[in-house]
Image (spheres, grey):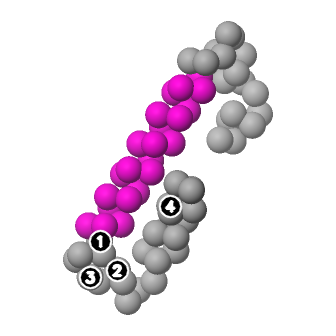
Amino acid sequence: MVLLLFLIVFMIDTMPQYRVRAQWRKIADLVNLTTASFFACEWVLRFYSFRRPKRYLIQPLTIID
């Protein structure tokens, strides 16, 4: 759900007719900050939940994520 919200805001943010509106800029910045924080927290929690965190860090899908 969070990823979908991020993608929708990202797509709308690329449309020139919405970029010039100051109110939209504030909303887009808030959504981007919130979703980035959510994903960062998720990554940190996943990191700490593994028994061998160093091994988790070198897995290819982790690097991509």
Amino acid at pointer 3: Arg
At x 45% / y 83%, what residue is drawn? 15
Residue 19 is a magenta residue: no
* For discs 4 and 3, the disc positioned in front in the rendered view: 4
Residue 42 is a magenta residue: yes
Q: CA distance from mark 4 to mark 3?
A: 19 Å
The residue identified by callout 4 is: 6
The residue identified by callout 1 is: 25
Which class describes the residues within 10 Å of circle 2: few (<14), some (14-19), or many (20+)?
some
* For discs 4 and 2, the disc positioned in front in the rendered view: 4
In the displayed orientation, state which residue is furthest to the right. Answer: 60
Amino acid at pointer 2: Arg
> Can you say whether 47 is above or below 31 in the image?
above
Q: Is residue 49 left or right of residue 23?
A: right
Regarding mark 2 in the picture, which secondary structure is present there? Answer: helix
Mark 4 / mark 1, whichever is N-terminal:
4
Residue 19's tag is: 2
Tell me where residue 13 appears, x and y as whole percent.
Answer: 43, 74
Mark 3 in CB contact with mark 1 (< 8 angstroms): yes
Q: Is residue 49 left or right of residue 39?
A: right
Mark 3 in CB contact with mark 2 (< 8 angstroms): yes
Mark 4 / mark 2, whichever is N-terminal:
4
Residue 21's tag is: 3
